[in-house]
Amino acid sequence: MAAQDYRNTGNSPRGDIIRHGMKIRNKVLAVQKTAGLALAALLLAACAKDIEPRGNLPPPEALAKLAPGEQTRQDVQGILGTPATTAIFDDENWYYISAHTTQYAFYPNHELDRTVYVVSFDRRGILSGVRKLNLEDGLNVSPEERSTPTKGREIGILEQLLGNVGRVGGGATPGGAGAPPR
């Protein structure tokens, strides 16, 4: 039997090629599935909420060391550190501000909670009290969106670009550099 009959035995070279092709195809599909799952996990992680602490919140142990009527501004600064801000019109209130904010994907920040310690001093610079405020104690202030009108005329982009054509190197302008004093 010079030529072998592979039709009924299942051991044909063509069958080996098909099985090998199916193995490669299965491996490619497995790699594609893994890459797809990794991409989905990465996209979901990118959309996760980020919670960030912000500000300078003194530890409770430091706040417990404060004694109203006995300590000066320098003492308080040594215990609590530099305040986040001070009162606008006087130096009698110091503010230590801390907040937790979150952001989901590309949406704007949202404040979860806020803690403000207001440290007050009397006119002599002696600690007079400490108050704790939170998010509910704050007021929403909406900025005014009006604009102040300016005098003069509004010029377009072409007038701006072409307005100085012919004026370059024309000599001194009246009242400008090189003009005699009045």
Image: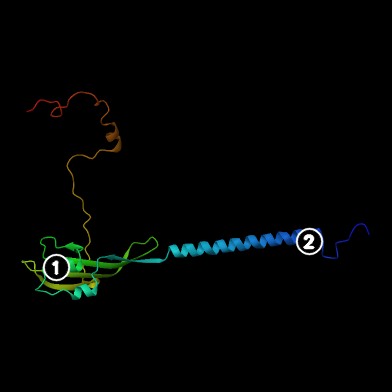
Which is nearer the eye, 16 or 111?
16
Report the residue at 25% width, 38% height from top.
Answer: 155
Of the 4 image quadrants, the one containing the N terminus is bottom right
Give the residue at mark 2: 15
Residue mark closest to the camera, 2 vs 1: 1
Report the residue at 23% width, 40% height from top.
Answer: 154
Report the residue at 51% width, 63% height from top.
Answer: 40
Q: Residues within 10 Å of mark 2 (few under 14, many from 20)?
A: few
Amino acid type of the residue that numbered disc 2 sits on in the rendered structure: Gly
Of the 4 image quadrants, the one containing the C terminus is top left
Q: Secondary structure at mark 2?
A: helix
**Residue 21, how many percent across, how many down?**
71, 59
**Residue 107, how many percent across, how many down?**
36, 62
Amino acid type of the residue that numbered disc 1 sits on in the rendered structure: Asp
- Name the side, left or right, on which 25 lies relative to 146: right
**Residue 95, how many percent across, how many down?**
18, 66
- Name the side, left or right, on which 16 lies relative to 8: left
User: Mark 2 and mark 1: span between their CA atoms?
Assistant: 88 Å
Report the residue at 80% width, 58% height from top.
Answer: 13
127 is higher (above) or lower (below) than 162: below
180 is higher (above) or lower (below) than 132: above
Give the residue at mark 1: 75
- Name the side, left or right, on which 69 lies relative to 28: left
Determine which quarter of the picture holds residue 65: bottom left
Determine which quarter of the picture holds residue 137: bottom left
20 is higher (above) or lower (below) than 112: above
- CB-based contact (under 8 Å), mark 2 and mark 1: no
Q: Residues within 10 Å of mark 1 (few under 14, many from 20)?
A: some
